[in-house]
Image (spheres, grey):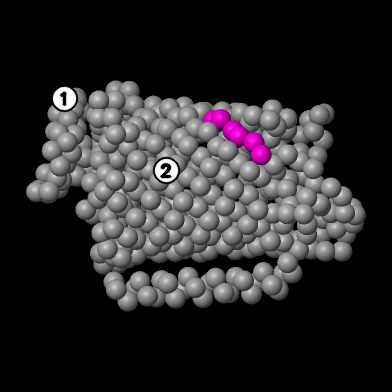
Amino acid sequence: MTKNKNYKLFFLNLIFILIFTFLNSEKSLSSEKNITYMQILQNPNDLDLNLKYAQQQGKMGNFKQTISTLERLNMMYPDNVEIKLYLLSILVQIDSPEKANTIIEEMKLDRDLAPDDLETLQEFEEELKNREPGLWTFAADISTGAVYGDNVNSVSKTRTKSSSDSIIGFNSAKHDRTLSGGLGLSASRPLGEMSGLLINLSHTTSEQYQETDDDFQSFGLTLAVDTVLGNQSLSPYVMLSKTDYQTDADSFSVMGGLGGFFTIGERNSFSYGYSYSDSKGNQNTSDTTAHESNSISHGFNLGHDFIFNELITTSLSLSYGNSNAVVGAGNDYENYDMGLSVNFAFPWAYISIGNALSFNDYKVVDTSVVSNKLRSDFTNTFDVMLTKAIGDFFPALDPNRSLFLNLSYEKVISEANMLNYDYIADSFSLSFSRSFRLN
C-alpha cells in the first residue's frame, strides 16, 4: 500500500472517530507483550491499554499505576461495585485507610448492595481497624500468564520480503506461545496531605516455546510522586530498567516524564503528558551492532474520557512520538497514533473493546531492505479485553476478590510500502494476578 493510500485511510478513520465522539457528546499500542509507560503516555485515555498496563504493573507491585487507572474507572462507573472492590483491595494492601474508608462508607449507603458485597466490605473495614498506623507500606505481587500468537514474527501476507533490493522468502515460524511470570516489591508513603511517594522493584521472566526472541529476564526500578496542583493531578516519575535477552544483547533504559489529568463537570476528563527516554544496547564481541539502535525518544499525548452513562464510557487518545538512533537507517522514525475504546462496566465483568491507528514515517532509507524507498507503515490494532475477580466464582478461594482473571484477544493489521512489514497477526492471552500486603 502506498503512503498516500495510508493517509486516505487515516482520514476516513479519523472522520469516523470524530463523528462517534460528537454523537456521544451530544448526550453529555503482545505473546502478551509488555506495555511500556511511553505507550501509556501516548495513549492515556485508551482504557483497554491502560487497564492492561494497570494489571501488568500490579503484577510487578507498581500499585501507583494500578490505582491511578482504577480511580479513573471508578469516576467513570460510579455505580459499578466490582471496580470499587478491585480498587478497595489495592488500597487496603498499600495501607491507604482514608481513601479506603471513604469508598467503604459510600458503598454502605447503597441499599441495593448484595449481601456478599456487604460482607466483603466488612472484612476490609475490620482489616483496616486491626492495623497499626505506619509511615511506610510494603507490598508484593505475583503473576503468571500464557499467550498464543499466530504470527509471532510478523511474517508478511505473501511470505516474501525485500532484502538488498531483491525479493526472497520470509520463512520464519508464525505460530508460537509464551509463558511469563512476575514478582514485584513496592514501598509507599505519604508526602504531606496531597502527595505520595512510590518506590518499586520488579522482576519479570518470559519463555518462548519454539523460538528464543521472547526468552528474557527484566529488572526495573521506579520512583514516582503523585501530587495535586490546583485542579491538576500530576505524576512526575523516573524509571530505570535492564533486560537480559537469551539470544540478544542486554538492553538498558532510563525514562522520565510527567503525566497529568483534570476533570470538567461530571462526565469529561482530559489528560496530557510528556516523556523522555534514553535506550541503549550492550555492544559486545558477540553482538557488535547492538549500539546502532541506541536511541533518544520524546513523546507527547492528549486524551479525553467521556461518561455516556453508568454502563458505557468512551476514550479517545492522540499522540506523537519522535525517535532518533545512533544509526538512523531503519531506526529513526516519527509516529502518529490515535485510538478509540468503548468500555462496558457490566455487573458480571469489565469488558473493553478498542481500535487504534498508528502511522510510522521513517526518516532514513534502509539500504539493507530497499535502497530507493523510504519506509512508511500504517497499523490497525483491534482488541477485546475481559477482567473478572476469581472470588465471584469461588468466594472461598478469593474472599476479598483480589485474585484476578484476565482474558484478551488482539488483532493487528499492518499495511506498508514494503513487503517486510505487510502482515496480519492475532494473539490470545490468559493471565492471573494476586497482590499481598507485607506489613
3D distance between C-alphas at marks 1 and 2: 28 Å
Q: Position of residue 39 (x, y in %)?
A: 53, 51
Tell me if residue 173 comes above or below residue 344 in the rendering.
above
Q: Position of residue 57 (x, y in %)?
A: 44, 38
Q: Amino acid at mark 2?
A: Ala
Residue at the image point whose x is 14% and y is 34% from the top = 119
Residue at the image point whose x is 71% and y is 38% from the top = 281
What is the quadrant of the N terminus in the image? Answer: bottom right
Q: Which residue is mark 1?
A: 130
Q: Amino acid at mark 1?
A: Asn
Tell which of 300 and 57 is nearer to you: 57
Q: Is residue 153 left or right of residue 233?
A: right
Which of the labelled discs sits on residue 54, or is there none?
A: 2
Q: Is residue 20 magenta?
A: no
Q: Main secondary structure of the magenta part?
A: strand
Q: Image quadrant of residue 421?
A: bottom right
Question: For the magenta stretch, what is the residue range?
Answer: 175-180
Tell me if residue 128 comes above or below residue 409 in the rendering.
above
Q: Position of residue 295 (x, y in %)?
A: 68, 48
Tell which of 18 and 410 is nearer to you: 410
